[in-house]
Amino acid sequence: MPATLKQVLRNNVKEKLARDEVVASMTVRLVRNVEIARIAATCGFDTIYVDVEHSTFSLDTTSQICVAALDAGVTPFVRVPAHGAEYVCRALDGGALGIIAPHIHSAEEAAALVRRAKYPPQGDRSAGGPLPQYQYRNFPVAEANEAANDATMVIAMMETRDALDNVESIAAVDGIDMLFIGTNDLCGELGIHGQYDHQLVRDAYARTIAACRSRGKHVGVGGLASRPDLVADFVAQGARYVSIGADLSFLLGAGAEKARFVHGLKR
């Protein structure tokens, strides 16, 4: 029986967030093979994001991982290094179901990002034919574009003073689904490197959560994998998307623990 568009094009993260559930995300910036998508699924992650901003990944590698994630039931996002169509549109055409855009400073930048990520009439993304998200099936263009617009998430990273000053207007932009706080970069911008307990950090989360909750948007927590206590605190306040670490940090952490065990054995 032929699959319907609704059956093949789903964003499980968007569905979970709509139910006010907490989403677990893993960052991919080391492993270049498709196996990482299946590993993420086995671990229980809802989503991965391929970090093209902080890696040497090509768009080809990024696409292969995204396609593998779709097949594994893990929602694939891509953190792009810049906001132009050369990254946003190509990442989406390669299989991503969402774009994470770093260093969004204003509502105008957020609106421009939405236009690049969405097909008309919401944006100006160019149609590229059957995509991995459609399992390479052909559907009527108008129907496919509408469904893709609905399934594709647009996520703006909050990492600067400007972003905090404009948080309410950014959250109000139609088509922005989530404001994702990059805590490390934000701390650097505020002159409090590594001071995750600082009141400025808490105020940034409180203000962002309030701005998003009042507009039906969501908040992501990033850069706090070493502080599960703070992650739990911000989730209790209303954040729902948690980026809990990268493939590299997981490998280093587990490997170091095993090495310590062996070195601690009694002779």
Image (tube, grey):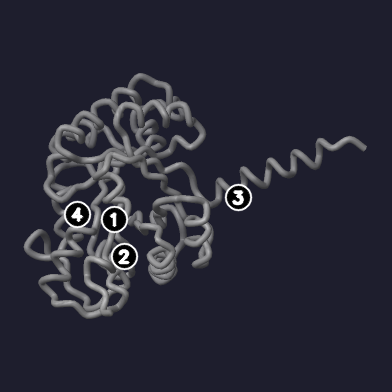
Q: Position of residue 233 (x, y in %)?
A: 39, 26
Q: Which residue is farthest top?
A: 199
Frontmost of labels 1 and 4 is 1
Q: Amino acid at mark 1?
A: Ile
Q: In 3D space, how far apart are the residues under numbered discs 2 and 3 (Cα atoms)? A: 26 Å
**Residue at (31, 34) in percent of width and height:** 239
- Tag 4, which secondary structure? helix
Question: Which residue is label 1 attached to?
Answer: 99
**Residue at (46, 57) in percent of width and height:** 55
Question: Which residue is label 4 attached to?
Answer: 113
Callout 1–callout 2 Cβ contact below 8 Å: yes
Depth order, front residue of 44/213: 44
Q: In 3D space, how far apart are the residues under numbered discs 4 and 2 (Cα atoms)? A: 13 Å
Frontmost of labels 4 and 3 is 3
Q: In 3D space, how far apart are the residues under numbered discs 1 and 4 (Cα atoms)? A: 9 Å
Question: Which residue is label 2 attached to?
Answer: 91
- Tag 1, which secondary structure? strand
- Image height check: is 88 above or below 2? above
Question: Counting residues from the N terminus, which is met first, the one under dot 1 or under dot 3?
Answer: 1
